[in-house]
Each structure stands twice: as C-alpha cells, then as structure tokens.
C-alpha cells in the first residue's frame, strides 16, 4: 500500500460527507494507495470537493482551499 495523507481541513471535510459520498472518497483513496510507486512519493489530499459539473462553484472553492492549505504546508 502506498501512503495517502489527508491535511486536517480535508479530513474534516471528508467526515462531514454523507455516507455514500464518504464511501466514494474512501474508494478513490484505496485506488491511490494501490497505484504505488507509479504515482511518485505518495499523495496528499488537501481538500474534498463536490463534483465540478454538478457544483462548479463549490468545486472552485474547494480548489482554492486546497491551494491555500498546500501553501501553508510548504511555508510550515
């Protein structure tokens, strides 16, 4: 298994998802874990976003949060 790390804000967003959506995120994480070395050193989940087609505004906001969180990690 390859390492997948949630930033704190992304972990909180995941925990607020309805069960079906949380299960979908968990399945995606399992796929990332299975990718292993083909995907670099590992993965960082910086935000959990709604689908971009059904909620473009929410998706953009999540992208902005992810960029901010990643910048904070780089500064830290």
Image (cartoon, rainbow, N blue to C red):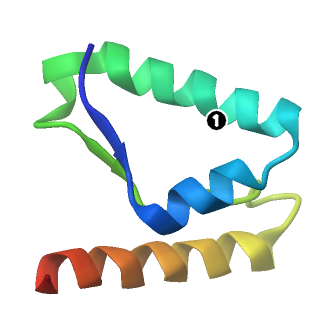
Q: Nearer the viewer, residue 20 or 8?
A: 8
Query: Residue 3, relative to residue 52: is it above or below?
Result: above
Q: Secondary structure at mark 1?
A: helix
Q: Residue 50: x percent and y percent?
A: 75, 58
Q: Which residue is at a point 21% across and 30% down the rendered structure image?
A: 39
Q: Quadrant of the C terminus?
A: bottom left
Residue denoted by label 1:
25
Q: Quadrant of the N terminus?
A: top left
Q: Residue 24: x percent and y percent?
A: 71, 29
Query: Residue 5, relative to residue 54: is it above or below?
Result: above
Looking at the image, residue 23 sits to the left or right of residue 46; the answer is right
Q: Which residue is at a point 13% across and 86% down the rendered structure image?
A: 75
User: Circle 1: is it few (<14), some (14-19), or many (20+) Cα within 10 Å?
Assistant: some
Q: Quadrant of residue 60?
A: bottom right
Q: How many marks?
A: 1
Query: Residue 30, relative to residue 72: is it above or below?
Result: above
Looking at the image, residue 45 sits to the left or right of residue 4; the answer is right
Looking at the image, residue 4 sits to the left or right of residue 31; the answer is left
Q: Quadrant of residue 2?
A: top left
Q: Which residue is at a point 45% across and 72% down the rendered structure image?
A: 66
Query: Residue 11, relative to residue 39: is it above or below?
Result: below
Q: Residue 53: x percent and y percent?
A: 81, 58
Q: Nearer the viewer, residue 55 or 62?
A: 62
Q: Residue 14: x percent and y percent?
A: 65, 50
């Amino acid at each position: 298994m390859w390492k997948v790390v949630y930033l704190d804000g992304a972990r909180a967003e995941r925990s607020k998802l309805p069960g079906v959506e949380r299960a979908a995120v968990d399945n995606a994480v399992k796929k990332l874990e299975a990718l292993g070395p083909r995907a670099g050193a590992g993965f960082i989940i910086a935000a959990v976003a709604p689908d971009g087609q059904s909620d473009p505004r929410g998706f953009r906001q999540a992208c902005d949060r992810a960029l901010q969180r990643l910048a904070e990690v780089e500064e830290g």
